[in-house]
Image: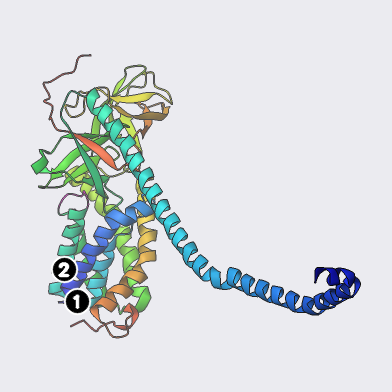
Amino acid sequence: MSYVIVLLFGMVAALLQSTLLRSLFPQSFVPDVFLLLVLYGSLLFPFGKGLLLAFALGLLSDLFSGAPEGLNALFSITLFVMSKAIQARVFMKGFRAIWGLTILAFALKVPYYTLLSVLFGLHFPTAADGVLIWVGEFVSSLILMPVLFYVVSKALGLQGGWFLQHQGSSPA
Amino acid sequence: MLFSRAEKQPESHSLQRGLLELSGPFQKGMTKGIGFFEALWQQYVYLVDLEAENRLLREIIEEMKQERIQLLEFQGENDRLRSLLGFKQDFQKPLLPAEIIAKDLSGWFQTAVIDRGTRDGIEEGMAVVSVQGIVGQVMESSRGFSRVLLITDPNNAVAGLIQRSRARGIVVGNGHQLCRVKYLHRSEDVMAGDLVLASGLDGVYPKGVLIGTVLKAETKDPELFQRVAVKPSVDFRRLEEVVVLCEKRDMEEKDPP
Protein backbone atom coordinates (compact mmCIF):
# COMPACT_ATOMS: atom_id res chain seq x y z
CA MET A 1 0.00 0.00 0.00
CA SER A 2 2.86 2.37 0.83
CA TYR A 3 4.19 1.98 -2.74
CA VAL A 4 0.89 3.24 -4.05
CA ILE A 5 1.06 6.23 -1.68
CA VAL A 6 4.53 7.17 -2.95
CA LEU A 7 3.32 6.75 -6.54
CA LEU A 8 0.23 8.88 -5.90
CA PHE A 9 2.38 11.43 -4.16
CA GLY A 10 4.62 11.58 -7.23
CA MET A 11 1.59 12.14 -9.47
CA VAL A 12 0.21 14.94 -7.33
CA ALA A 13 3.65 16.56 -7.12
CA ALA A 14 4.01 16.30 -10.90
CA LEU A 15 0.61 17.90 -11.50
CA LEU A 16 1.46 20.75 -9.16
CA GLN A 17 4.88 21.17 -10.69
CA SER A 18 3.65 21.27 -14.28
CA THR A 19 0.95 23.84 -13.57
CA LEU A 20 1.25 26.06 -10.53
CA LEU A 21 4.97 25.86 -9.76
CA ARG A 22 6.05 26.36 -13.36
CA SER A 23 4.21 29.65 -13.36
CA LEU A 24 5.69 30.79 -10.07
CA PHE A 25 9.34 29.82 -10.40
CA PRO A 26 11.99 30.63 -13.02
CA GLN A 27 12.16 28.30 -15.97
CA SER A 28 15.35 26.48 -15.00
CA PHE A 29 14.53 26.30 -11.30
CA VAL A 30 12.64 23.01 -11.50
CA PRO A 31 13.24 20.26 -8.92
CA ASP A 32 13.36 16.62 -10.06
CA VAL A 33 10.66 15.27 -7.76
CA PHE A 34 10.66 11.78 -9.26
CA LEU A 35 14.41 11.35 -8.88
CA LEU A 36 14.14 12.31 -5.21
CA LEU A 37 11.29 9.85 -4.70
CA VAL A 38 13.28 7.06 -6.37
CA LEU A 39 16.22 7.71 -4.02
CA TYR A 40 13.94 7.85 -1.03
CA GLY A 41 12.29 4.63 -2.16
CA SER A 42 15.68 2.95 -2.38
CA LEU A 43 16.23 3.68 1.31
CA LEU A 44 12.78 2.52 2.36
CA PHE A 45 11.68 -0.39 0.23
CA PRO A 46 13.14 -3.88 -0.45
CA PHE A 47 14.87 -4.51 -3.77
CA GLY A 48 12.13 -6.18 -5.85
CA LYS A 49 9.21 -3.92 -5.13
CA GLY A 50 11.44 -0.86 -4.88
CA LEU A 51 12.73 -1.58 -8.38
CA LEU A 52 9.19 -1.74 -9.73
CA LEU A 53 8.39 1.52 -7.98
CA ALA A 54 11.49 3.16 -9.45
CA PHE A 55 10.46 2.02 -12.93
CA ALA A 56 6.91 3.30 -12.42
CA LEU A 57 8.13 6.66 -11.15
CA GLY A 58 10.57 6.99 -14.06
CA LEU A 59 7.84 6.16 -16.53
CA LEU A 60 5.52 8.70 -14.93
CA SER A 61 8.27 11.28 -15.23
CA ASP A 62 8.56 10.47 -18.94
CA LEU A 63 4.81 10.73 -19.42
CA PHE A 64 4.52 14.06 -17.63
CA SER A 65 7.36 15.59 -19.61
CA GLY A 66 8.21 15.68 -23.26
CA ALA A 67 10.98 13.12 -22.79
CA PRO A 68 10.92 9.95 -24.91
CA GLU A 69 9.30 7.07 -23.01
CA GLY A 70 11.94 5.07 -21.21
CA LEU A 71 14.51 7.82 -20.81
CA ASN A 72 13.80 8.53 -17.18
CA ALA A 73 12.51 5.02 -16.48
CA LEU A 74 15.93 3.59 -17.35
CA PHE A 75 17.68 6.27 -15.34
CA SER A 76 15.45 5.61 -12.33
CA ILE A 77 16.21 1.89 -12.41
CA THR A 78 19.93 2.62 -12.74
CA LEU A 79 19.80 4.99 -9.80
CA PHE A 80 17.84 2.55 -7.68
CA VAL A 81 20.30 -0.28 -8.31
CA MET A 82 23.25 2.04 -7.71
CA SER A 83 21.75 3.26 -4.46
CA LYS A 84 21.06 -0.29 -3.24
CA ALA A 85 24.59 -1.35 -4.17
CA ILE A 86 26.05 1.55 -2.20
CA GLN A 87 23.84 0.81 0.76
CA ALA A 88 24.99 -2.83 0.75
CA ARG A 89 28.63 -1.79 1.02
CA VAL A 90 28.53 1.44 2.98
CA PHE A 91 26.62 1.99 6.19
CA MET A 92 24.43 4.98 5.40
CA LYS A 93 22.37 6.89 7.84
CA GLY A 94 20.67 10.20 8.23
CA PHE A 95 20.66 13.35 6.25
CA ARG A 96 24.13 12.86 4.82
CA ALA A 97 23.09 9.55 3.23
CA ILE A 98 20.25 10.93 1.18
CA TRP A 99 22.18 14.12 0.49
CA GLY A 100 25.15 12.15 -0.82
CA LEU A 101 22.92 9.95 -2.96
CA THR A 102 21.20 13.00 -4.46
CA ILE A 103 24.51 14.63 -5.37
CA LEU A 104 25.69 11.37 -6.93
CA ALA A 105 22.45 11.00 -8.88
CA PHE A 106 22.71 14.50 -10.32
CA ALA A 107 26.36 13.94 -11.17
CA LEU A 108 25.34 10.79 -13.08
CA LYS A 109 22.69 12.64 -15.01
CA VAL A 110 25.21 14.51 -17.14
CA PRO A 111 27.06 11.47 -18.60
CA TYR A 112 23.72 9.64 -18.92
CA TYR A 113 22.19 12.40 -21.07
CA THR A 114 25.41 12.70 -23.05
CA LEU A 115 25.37 8.96 -23.72
CA LEU A 116 21.74 9.10 -24.81
CA SER A 117 22.37 11.97 -27.17
CA VAL A 118 25.19 9.99 -28.80
CA LEU A 119 23.37 6.63 -28.91
CA PHE A 120 19.86 7.74 -29.84
CA GLY A 121 20.39 11.13 -31.46
CA LEU A 122 18.44 13.00 -28.80
CA HIS A 123 19.16 16.70 -28.65
CA PHE A 124 19.83 18.25 -25.29
CA PRO A 125 20.61 21.88 -24.54
CA THR A 126 24.10 23.05 -25.36
CA ALA A 127 26.75 23.02 -22.63
CA ALA A 128 26.24 26.58 -21.43
CA ASP A 129 22.45 26.31 -21.27
CA GLY A 130 22.62 22.74 -20.01
CA VAL A 131 24.73 23.82 -17.05
CA LEU A 132 22.17 26.49 -16.20
CA ILE A 133 19.32 23.99 -16.28
CA TRP A 134 21.34 21.38 -14.39
CA VAL A 135 22.34 23.81 -11.61
CA GLY A 136 18.74 25.08 -11.28
CA GLU A 137 17.42 21.54 -11.05
CA PHE A 138 20.14 20.47 -8.62
CA VAL A 139 19.75 23.43 -6.23
CA SER A 140 15.94 23.36 -6.26
CA SER A 141 15.99 19.59 -5.64
CA LEU A 142 18.35 19.97 -2.68
CA ILE A 143 16.07 22.65 -1.23
CA LEU A 144 12.92 20.64 -1.79
CA MET A 145 14.41 17.32 -0.60
CA PRO A 146 13.94 17.66 3.20
CA VAL A 147 10.41 19.04 2.78
CA LEU A 148 9.42 16.30 0.35
CA PHE A 149 10.84 13.51 2.49
CA TYR A 150 9.21 14.85 5.62
CA VAL A 151 5.81 15.02 3.92
CA VAL A 152 6.17 11.53 2.42
CA SER A 153 7.26 10.13 5.80
CA LYS A 154 4.19 11.68 7.38
CA ALA A 155 1.97 10.31 4.62
CA LEU A 156 3.45 6.82 5.12
CA GLY A 157 2.95 7.11 8.87
CA LEU A 158 6.57 6.31 9.67
CA GLN A 159 7.63 6.43 13.30
CA GLY A 160 9.42 9.62 14.18
CA GLY A 161 7.95 11.38 11.17
CA TRP A 162 11.39 12.33 9.91
CA PHE A 163 13.40 10.45 7.36
CA LEU A 164 16.57 10.56 9.41
CA GLN A 165 15.16 8.30 12.05
CA HIS A 166 13.73 5.40 10.21
CA GLN A 167 16.75 3.92 8.54
CA GLY A 168 16.23 0.20 8.26
CA SER A 169 12.57 0.33 9.23
CA SER A 170 10.45 -0.31 6.19
CA PRO A 171 6.88 0.93 6.12
CA ALA A 172 4.13 -1.64 6.33
CA MET B 1 -53.20 92.74 34.49
CA LEU B 2 -51.30 94.27 31.75
CA PHE B 3 -51.44 97.68 33.28
CA SER B 4 -50.48 96.39 36.69
CA ARG B 5 -47.57 94.53 35.14
CA ALA B 6 -46.68 97.65 33.25
CA GLU B 7 -46.73 99.66 36.37
CA LYS B 8 -44.68 97.05 38.30
CA GLN B 9 -42.23 96.41 35.46
CA PRO B 10 -39.05 96.97 37.44
CA GLU B 11 -39.99 94.41 40.10
CA SER B 12 -41.25 91.86 37.64
CA HIS B 13 -38.12 92.34 35.70
CA SER B 14 -36.15 91.47 38.75
CA LEU B 15 -38.34 88.42 39.29
CA GLN B 16 -37.88 87.36 35.76
CA ARG B 17 -34.19 87.83 36.08
CA GLY B 18 -34.17 85.83 39.27
CA LEU B 19 -36.18 83.07 37.64
CA LEU B 20 -33.93 83.15 34.72
CA GLU B 21 -30.96 82.97 37.02
CA LEU B 22 -32.45 80.06 38.86
CA SER B 23 -33.65 78.17 35.86
CA GLY B 24 -30.60 78.91 33.77
CA PRO B 25 -28.30 76.34 35.30
CA PHE B 26 -30.93 73.68 35.03
CA GLN B 27 -31.61 74.56 31.46
CA LYS B 28 -27.95 74.57 30.80
CA GLY B 29 -27.60 71.26 32.51
CA MET B 30 -30.56 69.87 30.63
CA THR B 31 -29.27 71.14 27.33
CA LYS B 32 -25.82 69.83 28.02
CA GLY B 33 -27.31 66.55 29.14
CA ILE B 34 -29.37 66.31 25.99
CA GLY B 35 -26.34 67.33 24.01
CA PHE B 36 -24.31 64.68 25.79
CA PHE B 37 -26.86 61.99 25.12
CA GLU B 38 -27.37 63.21 21.61
CA ALA B 39 -23.64 63.11 21.06
CA LEU B 40 -23.55 59.70 22.70
CA TRP B 41 -26.28 58.53 20.40
CA GLN B 42 -24.70 60.10 17.37
CA GLN B 43 -21.14 59.03 18.05
CA TYR B 44 -21.56 55.66 19.75
CA VAL B 45 -25.02 54.15 19.64
CA TYR B 46 -25.72 55.40 16.14
CA LEU B 47 -22.26 54.19 15.09
CA VAL B 48 -23.43 50.63 15.60
CA ASP B 49 -25.59 51.10 12.55
CA LEU B 50 -22.83 53.07 10.92
CA GLU B 51 -20.43 50.25 11.56
CA ALA B 52 -22.83 47.86 9.91
CA GLU B 53 -23.30 50.27 7.06
CA ASN B 54 -19.57 50.71 6.82
CA ARG B 55 -19.10 46.95 6.66
CA LEU B 56 -21.74 46.72 3.97
CA LEU B 57 -20.06 49.46 1.98
CA ARG B 58 -16.71 47.77 2.37
CA GLU B 59 -18.22 44.53 1.13
CA ILE B 60 -19.70 46.38 -1.82
CA ILE B 61 -16.29 47.96 -2.53
CA GLU B 62 -14.62 44.54 -2.35
CA GLU B 63 -17.24 43.07 -4.67
CA MET B 64 -16.77 45.95 -7.07
CA LYS B 65 -13.00 45.51 -6.91
CA GLN B 66 -13.42 41.81 -7.74
CA GLU B 67 -15.77 42.69 -10.56
CA ARG B 68 -13.28 45.25 -11.84
CA ILE B 69 -10.48 42.67 -11.77
CA GLN B 70 -12.73 40.22 -13.62
CA LEU B 71 -13.71 42.85 -16.13
CA LEU B 72 -10.07 43.75 -16.72
CA GLU B 73 -9.31 40.05 -17.15
CA PHE B 74 -12.21 39.72 -19.61
CA GLN B 75 -11.04 42.83 -21.41
CA GLY B 76 -7.53 41.38 -21.71
CA GLU B 77 -8.93 38.09 -22.92
CA ASN B 78 -11.21 39.92 -25.32
CA ASP B 79 -8.26 41.87 -26.72
CA ARG B 80 -6.24 38.69 -27.13
CA LEU B 81 -9.16 36.89 -28.80
CA ARG B 82 -9.73 39.86 -31.10
CA SER B 83 -6.08 39.68 -32.07
CA LEU B 84 -6.46 35.95 -32.65
CA LEU B 85 -9.52 36.62 -34.79
CA GLY B 86 -7.60 39.12 -36.85
CA PHE B 87 -4.77 36.65 -37.01
CA LYS B 88 -7.22 33.96 -38.15
CA GLN B 89 -8.44 36.17 -40.96
CA ASP B 90 -4.85 36.56 -42.13
CA PHE B 91 -4.58 32.82 -42.61
CA GLN B 92 -6.53 30.99 -45.23
CA LYS B 93 -6.35 27.69 -43.33
CA PRO B 94 -8.65 26.42 -40.59
CA LEU B 95 -7.38 27.49 -37.20
CA LEU B 96 -8.35 26.05 -33.86
CA PRO B 97 -7.90 28.17 -30.75
CA ALA B 98 -6.54 26.38 -27.70
CA GLU B 99 -5.43 27.18 -24.20
CA ILE B 100 -2.17 26.15 -22.56
CA ILE B 101 -2.99 24.20 -19.43
CA ALA B 102 0.40 22.84 -18.32
CA LYS B 103 4.09 23.02 -19.03
CA ASP B 104 6.87 20.48 -19.10
CA LEU B 105 7.72 18.79 -15.84
CA SER B 106 11.47 19.04 -16.31
CA GLY B 107 13.69 21.86 -17.44
CA TRP B 108 15.41 19.65 -20.02
CA PHE B 109 12.52 19.57 -22.48
CA GLN B 110 10.43 22.49 -23.64
CA THR B 111 6.88 21.31 -24.11
CA ALA B 112 3.40 22.53 -23.20
CA VAL B 113 0.01 20.86 -22.96
CA ILE B 114 -3.02 22.37 -24.72
CA ASP B 115 -6.70 21.63 -24.14
CA ARG B 116 -7.43 20.30 -27.63
CA GLY B 117 -6.98 16.78 -28.91
CA THR B 118 -7.83 14.32 -31.64
CA ARG B 119 -11.58 14.80 -31.19
CA ASP B 120 -11.04 18.44 -32.22
CA GLY B 121 -9.18 17.31 -35.32
CA ILE B 122 -5.65 17.77 -34.06
CA GLU B 123 -2.94 15.49 -35.40
CA GLU B 124 0.73 15.10 -34.69
CA GLY B 125 2.93 17.46 -36.65
CA MET B 126 0.44 20.32 -36.87
CA ALA B 127 1.87 23.78 -36.40
CA VAL B 128 0.94 25.82 -33.33
CA VAL B 129 1.19 29.60 -33.52
CA SER B 130 0.10 32.63 -31.57
CA VAL B 131 -0.43 36.29 -32.36
CA GLN B 132 3.22 36.95 -31.55
CA GLY B 133 4.60 34.20 -33.76
CA ILE B 134 5.48 30.53 -33.97
CA VAL B 135 4.95 28.48 -30.82
CA GLY B 136 5.84 24.95 -31.90
CA GLN B 137 4.30 21.80 -33.28
CA VAL B 138 2.05 19.08 -31.91
CA MET B 139 4.15 16.07 -30.87
CA GLU B 140 1.44 13.84 -29.38
CA SER B 141 -2.32 13.94 -28.95
CA SER B 142 -4.89 12.21 -26.82
CA ARG B 143 -8.66 12.62 -27.26
CA GLY B 144 -8.89 15.89 -25.41
CA PHE B 145 -5.33 17.16 -25.01
CA SER B 146 -2.12 17.56 -26.97
CA ARG B 147 1.51 18.09 -26.15
CA VAL B 148 3.26 20.80 -28.12
CA LEU B 149 7.02 20.79 -28.70
CA LEU B 150 8.04 24.42 -28.36
CA ILE B 151 10.52 26.05 -30.73
CA THR B 152 12.89 26.58 -27.79
CA ASP B 153 13.38 22.81 -27.46
CA PRO B 154 16.63 21.55 -29.04
CA ASN B 155 14.68 18.72 -30.74
CA ASN B 156 12.52 21.19 -32.68
CA ALA B 157 13.64 22.73 -35.95
CA VAL B 158 12.04 25.38 -38.14
CA ALA B 159 13.16 26.38 -41.60
CA GLY B 160 13.75 30.10 -41.25
CA LEU B 161 14.95 33.09 -43.19
CA ILE B 162 16.29 36.49 -42.30
CA GLN B 163 13.69 39.01 -43.46
CA ARG B 164 16.15 41.73 -44.49
CA SER B 165 18.76 39.70 -46.37
CA ARG B 166 16.60 36.61 -47.22
CA ALA B 167 19.38 34.37 -45.90
CA ARG B 168 18.08 30.90 -45.02
CA GLY B 169 18.91 28.65 -42.10
CA ILE B 170 17.47 26.18 -39.61
CA VAL B 171 16.18 27.62 -36.36
CA VAL B 172 16.59 25.26 -33.41
CA GLY B 173 15.94 25.80 -29.72
CA ASN B 174 18.71 26.02 -27.19
CA GLY B 175 16.57 24.44 -24.47
CA HIS B 176 16.47 27.61 -22.46
CA GLN B 177 14.23 30.38 -23.79
CA LEU B 178 16.34 31.19 -26.85
CA CYS B 179 16.90 29.75 -30.31
CA ARG B 180 19.82 29.74 -32.69
CA VAL B 181 20.08 29.64 -36.46
CA LYS B 182 22.16 26.78 -37.80
CA TYR B 183 23.78 26.47 -41.20
CA LEU B 184 23.83 30.17 -41.93
CA HIS B 185 26.93 30.71 -44.07
CA ARG B 186 29.51 33.18 -42.79
CA SER B 187 29.17 35.30 -45.89
CA GLU B 188 25.46 35.94 -45.27
CA ASP B 189 24.41 39.40 -44.12
CA VAL B 190 22.93 39.05 -40.63
CA MET B 191 22.96 41.55 -37.80
CA ALA B 192 21.36 42.06 -34.42
CA GLY B 193 17.76 43.24 -34.65
CA ASP B 194 17.00 41.39 -37.90
CA LEU B 195 13.65 39.64 -37.97
CA VAL B 196 13.63 35.87 -38.48
CA LEU B 197 10.60 34.44 -40.29
CA ALA B 198 9.48 30.95 -41.23
CA SER B 199 10.53 30.16 -44.78
CA GLY B 200 7.82 27.53 -45.23
CA LEU B 201 10.29 24.97 -46.56
CA ASP B 202 9.87 22.57 -43.65
CA GLY B 203 6.28 21.75 -44.61
CA VAL B 204 5.02 22.49 -41.11
CA TYR B 205 4.90 26.24 -40.64
CA PRO B 206 3.45 28.64 -43.22
CA LYS B 207 5.83 31.07 -44.83
CA GLY B 208 6.20 34.51 -43.29
CA VAL B 209 5.19 33.78 -39.72
CA LEU B 210 7.49 35.51 -37.27
CA ILE B 211 9.94 33.36 -35.31
CA GLY B 212 11.92 36.01 -33.47
CA THR B 213 14.61 38.64 -33.56
CA VAL B 214 18.36 38.19 -33.97
CA LEU B 215 20.08 38.93 -30.66
CA LYS B 216 23.64 38.58 -31.89
CA ALA B 217 25.48 37.18 -34.85
CA GLU B 218 29.15 36.33 -34.75
CA THR B 219 31.61 34.67 -37.04
CA LYS B 220 34.59 32.74 -35.72
CA ASP B 221 37.52 32.25 -38.02
CA PRO B 222 37.80 28.56 -38.77
CA GLU B 223 34.04 28.05 -38.74
CA LEU B 224 32.06 27.90 -41.95
CA PHE B 225 28.75 28.98 -40.40
CA GLN B 226 27.79 31.95 -38.28
CA ARG B 227 26.64 31.70 -34.69
CA VAL B 228 23.30 33.45 -34.56
CA ALA B 229 21.23 33.73 -31.39
CA VAL B 230 17.52 34.43 -31.80
CA LYS B 231 15.08 35.67 -29.19
CA PRO B 232 11.66 34.13 -29.94
CA SER B 233 8.89 36.65 -30.48
CA VAL B 234 6.61 34.58 -28.26
CA ASP B 235 6.96 35.12 -24.54
CA PHE B 236 6.57 31.50 -23.44
CA ARG B 237 6.32 32.37 -19.76
CA ARG B 238 3.20 34.43 -20.32
CA LEU B 239 1.69 32.52 -23.20
CA GLU B 240 -1.92 31.49 -22.51
CA GLU B 241 -3.77 31.15 -25.80
CA VAL B 242 -2.53 29.63 -29.03
CA VAL B 243 -4.02 28.52 -32.31
CA VAL B 244 -3.41 25.22 -34.06
CA LEU B 245 -3.16 25.19 -37.83
CA CYS B 246 -5.48 22.30 -38.48
CA GLU B 247 -4.33 21.60 -41.98
CA LYS B 248 -1.12 19.63 -42.33
CA ARG B 249 1.03 20.85 -45.14
CA ASP B 250 2.65 18.49 -47.60
CA MET B 251 6.29 18.76 -48.38
CA GLU B 252 5.37 19.12 -52.02
CA GLU B 253 3.20 22.16 -51.31
CA LYS B 254 5.44 25.15 -51.82
CA ASP B 255 4.61 28.72 -51.06
CA PRO B 256 5.30 31.25 -53.75
CA PRO B 257 8.62 33.03 -53.23
Residue type marked 2: Leu
Residue A118 at x, y = what percent?
Answer: 22, 45
Residue identified by numbered label 1: A45
Which of the image's four quarters has the C terminus of chain A?
bottom left
Distance from the alpha carbon under mark 2 to that under mark 1: 9 Å
Horizontal side, residue A48 vs residue B70: left or right: left
Could you tell me which chain the residue with mark 1 belongs to? Answer: A
Image coordinates of residue A92 in percent, x first then y, are 31, 78
Image marks 2 and 1: residues in contact by CB distance under 8 Å: yes
Chain of the residue displaying label 2: A
What's drawn in magenta, residue-wise?
A65-69
| SS type, badge 2 | helix
Q: Which mark is residue A151?
A: none
Q: Is residue A114 above or below residue A55?
A: above
Query: What amino acid is labelled 1 in the image?
Result: Phe
Q: From where the camera sits, is residue A52 visible?
A: yes
Main SS type for the magenta part? Answer: loop
**Of helix, strand and loop, which one carries label 1?**
loop
Counting from the top left corner in percent of width and height, residue A100 is at 35, 69
User: In this figure, which residue is indicated by the disc labeled 2?
Assistant: A53
Q: Quadrant of residue B92?
A: top left
Mark 2 crowdedness (10 Å alpha carbons): few <14, some 14-19, many ≥20:
many
